[in-house]
């Protein structure tokens, strides 16, 4: 199955983009070629750009606090695994305290790094890190794999708290939804959403052998999914066939 996800609020969008960039780092950190190092630095710079909003720390702390409040109401439920719930609440409380006690923007240590700042600035223009535009970066790329790896590991370690927060919140969001088998007639599915329930994420699962992909459109009141025939040569068109798929609404 291929799972397609559509975030319904700003925090969910940021979390999914962070996951994408951190997964890119994790993949290329298994190798030590100069181009792998280059890709990792681009991803780290993109993470910093994504975290640039000065109010993001406050927004994340309020979101974590909301999850703590929501899950805390389950502590007296007999159907809940209480040790697991308490462990989860402890992790959320630790992350919440870290967000509250921090100063400035997230990953401030990396923002203070002169070398990374230079790379970020040059990445704003096409091929901005080429040898004649940024000779120090060209010199860095010629260093031994051990030297580059040591520096990259240090930079990436500064994102450990953010990675833990991101993984935990996305796990909570995704686990709050359960897939339901549905059918889209003539390649189209529509349903109403409860405006009083905070749906963070819509997930659509399709069998990998089906040459289609969903285009998901959702607002506060309504969800629409258009199933498009995959075509890499011309503009994709909506399927005219009925499509069996699975849908999960992630509400927490």
Image (tube, helix red, strand yellow):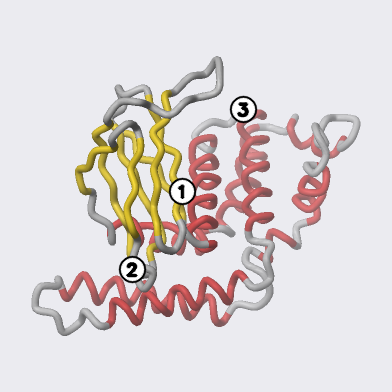
Quadrant, the C terminus = bottom left
- The numbered disc on residue 217 is 1
- The numbered disc on residue 252 is 2
Q: Are marks 2 and 1 in contact (CB under 8 Å)?
A: no
**Rendering coords of residue 2 (x, y %):** 34, 34
**Rendering coords of residue 228 (x, y %):** 42, 29
Say which residue appears at 23% left-offset and 73% top-offset.
Answer: 85
Say which of 240 and 25 sits in front: 240
**Rendering coords of residue 49 (x, y %):** 68, 55
Query: Callout 3: 10 Å neighbours few (<14), some, many (20+)?
Result: some
> Mark 1 or mark 3, which is nearer to you?
1
- The numbered disc on residue 33 is 3
> Mark 2 or mark 3, which is nearer to you?
2
As drawn, the residue found furthest toward the top would be 233
In the rendered view, does 133 fall on the left or right side of 171?
right
As drawn, the residue found furthest toward the left would be 78
Say which residue appears at 83% left-offset and 39% top-offset.
Answer: 125
Q: Is residue 168 visible?
A: yes
What's the CA distance linking mark 1 and mark 3? 40 Å
Say which of 91 and 189 sits in front: 189
In the rendered view, does 154 fall on the left or right side of 179?
right
Residue 32: quarter of image: top right
Quadrant, the N terminus = top left
What's the CA distance linking mark 2 and mark 3? 42 Å
Residue 21: quarter of image: top right
Secondary structure beneath disc 2? Answer: loop
Give whichever of discs 1 and 3 has the lower sequence position: 3
Secondary structure beneath disc 1? Answer: strand
């Amino acid at each position: 199955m291929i799972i397609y996800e559509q975030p319904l609020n700003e925090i969910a969008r940021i979390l999914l983009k962070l996951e994408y960039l951190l997964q890119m780092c994790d993949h290329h950190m298994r190798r030590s070629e100069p181009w792998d190092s280059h890709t990792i630095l681009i991803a780290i710079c993109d993470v910093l750009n994504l975290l640039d909003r000065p109010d993001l720390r406050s927004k994340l702390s309020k979101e974590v606090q909301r999850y703590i409040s929501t899950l805390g109401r389950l502590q007296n439920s007999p159907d809940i695994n209480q040790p697991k719930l308490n462990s989860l609440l402890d992790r959320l409380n630790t992350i919440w305290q870290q967000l509250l006690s921090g100063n400035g923007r997230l990953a401030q240590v990396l923002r203070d790094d002169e070398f990374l700042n230079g790379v970020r600035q040059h990445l704003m223009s096409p091929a901005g890190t080429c040898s004649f535009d940024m000779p120090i970066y060209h010199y860095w790329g010629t260093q031994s794999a051990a030297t580059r790896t040591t520096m990259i590991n240090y930079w990436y370690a500064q994102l450990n708290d953010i990675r833990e927060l991101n993984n935990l919140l996305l796990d909570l969001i995704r686990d709050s939804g359960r897939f339901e088998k549905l059918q889209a007639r003539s390649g189209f599915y529509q349903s109403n959403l409860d405006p009083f329930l905070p749906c963070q994420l819509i997930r659509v699962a399709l069998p990998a052998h089906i040459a289609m992909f969903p285009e998901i459109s959702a607002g506060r009141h309504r969800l629409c999914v258009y199933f498009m025939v995959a075509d890499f040569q011309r503009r994709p068109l909506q399927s005219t066939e009925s499509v069996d798929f699975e849908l999960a609404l992630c509400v927490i």
